[in-house]
Amino acid sequence: MAYTEKVLLSGTALSFLFYECVNSSNSQEGFLIGDVTSEITNHISDSQSDNARLDTQIEIRTVLPLPAVSLFYFPTGRIKEDVLSDMLSSTANEIVGWYKYRKNTNIKPTFRDKLISKGLQKYFEKYHGKKNFVTCNLSNKSSSAGSTHTFMYRFGKINCFDMYEYVEDITANLGEKYTGYKKSHRLSPHSIFNKIVRESNVQSNDTSNAILRIQEAVDVRLVKEAKAAAKNECTIRELEAEIKQMATILSDKHSFELQSAYNKYVEEKIMNRETEMARACLEALTTPLKVEILNVKNAPVNSNHTDSEDSVQLIENDVKETSPSPPLISSSSSKPVLNYAAALKTKNEVATTSKANHHSDDLITFDVDDNHMKKTLIISEDVKCGDSSPEY
């Protein structure tokens, strides 16, 4: 008996599969949900009166994407049966294959992919009773401008000889392999419609009320499914609100931790600065101060500690020339005086002002105003003893 096997994929299921793959970051894995039907077709021809053929159709209705890769198998390709039983406890009998998507790579399966397919086929054989578990490898690439996206996919399976072989796939509205008479696909005995017909207890001999009873059963099942869908929607809204609340709490906690870390950093910086300043002060106190007198500017020089007013005047004049600092102002409240006796003793000397008062040798003293204009002082050499004052 001849044997054929092909995969039937609706346009909705194919678009949903591409949507999940494109929205993934790099790789995507998941399971294919559908039905497996088999039928025997007898072809009669002139050369051979009886030519039976077994046609197996694997119809894929939807996909079940997984949140991450390598969830149900080890890096060596061995299957984690306990993880599969937990994830697919309610939909294990509807799983007909699995898919793996890789971006910008070849769709040829690797050795590990073949080991995973073999392990999954062995695991789901107890639910289907046949080795009809298929594998879909997908990939895509885009043009340089990003305007055109090309998707590549191909189905395969492990045959009875434990060899990997490709399986023909047919997608509705994308071009049929053969032209001619097209018959409708046979429904699986596990389909929803067949379940409703069995639950309605329609008798084959009673055809008058069969349609009404089936319609009533469909309405009851529709109301039941609508209530289940509404309950699931409420659960989804609650989960979304909980996720949003947890995200807000996590962001607040993260902000508080960042603020605490910043405050701690600022405190440590201030403490380090104060420590450095205290250390610098201690070093300044413990280190003796060294002053080089020869290099110090504006240092007063007193040669031989002479009391003559000429030497004091020279020192003051030198200080005024070399120092940009303001002149020293006398703290004494008395005005400078002119010693007339000293002027008489030294004929060639010029009269100077003195801040100190010498009353022992003074014959005649005159008050000199600092703000007064400078005048020329003429002293006559012909001094007469009988005169009371010199001539000006």
Image (spheres, grey):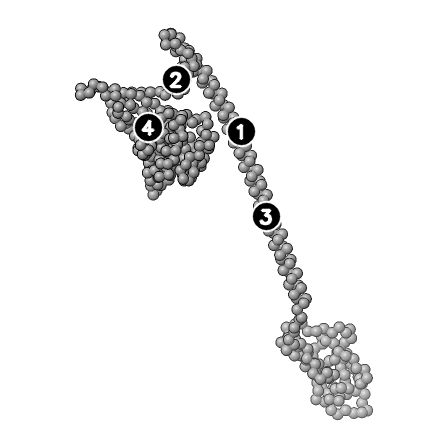
Nearest-to-viewer mark from 2 and 1? 2
Disc 2 from disc 4: Cα separation: 22 Å
Q: Is residue 320 visible?
A: no
Mark before the other along the chain sequence, 2 or 1: 2
User: Foreground residue, 233 or 101?
Assistant: 101
Q: Which mark is residue 194?
A: 2
For label 3, the residue is 261
Nearest-to-viewer mark from 2 and 3? 2
Expressed as whole percent of the image width and height from the top left, the position of residue 290 reads 65, 73
Mark before the other along the chain sequence, 4 or 3: 4
- Horizontally, residue 336 falls left or right of residue 143, namely right
Nearest-to-viewer mark from 1 and 4? 4
Disc 2 from disc 1: Cα separation: 35 Å
Q: Quadrant of the C terminus?
A: bottom right
Q: Is residue 44 above or below residue 161?
A: above
Which residue is drawn at the image coordinates 66% and 79% (left, top)? 317
Disc 4 from disc 3: Cα separation: 59 Å
- Horizontally, residue 340 falls left or right of residue 194, namely right
Q: Which mark is residue 7?
A: 4
Which secondary structure lies at badge 3? helix
Q: Identify which amino acid the numbered label 3 is placed on.
A: Ala
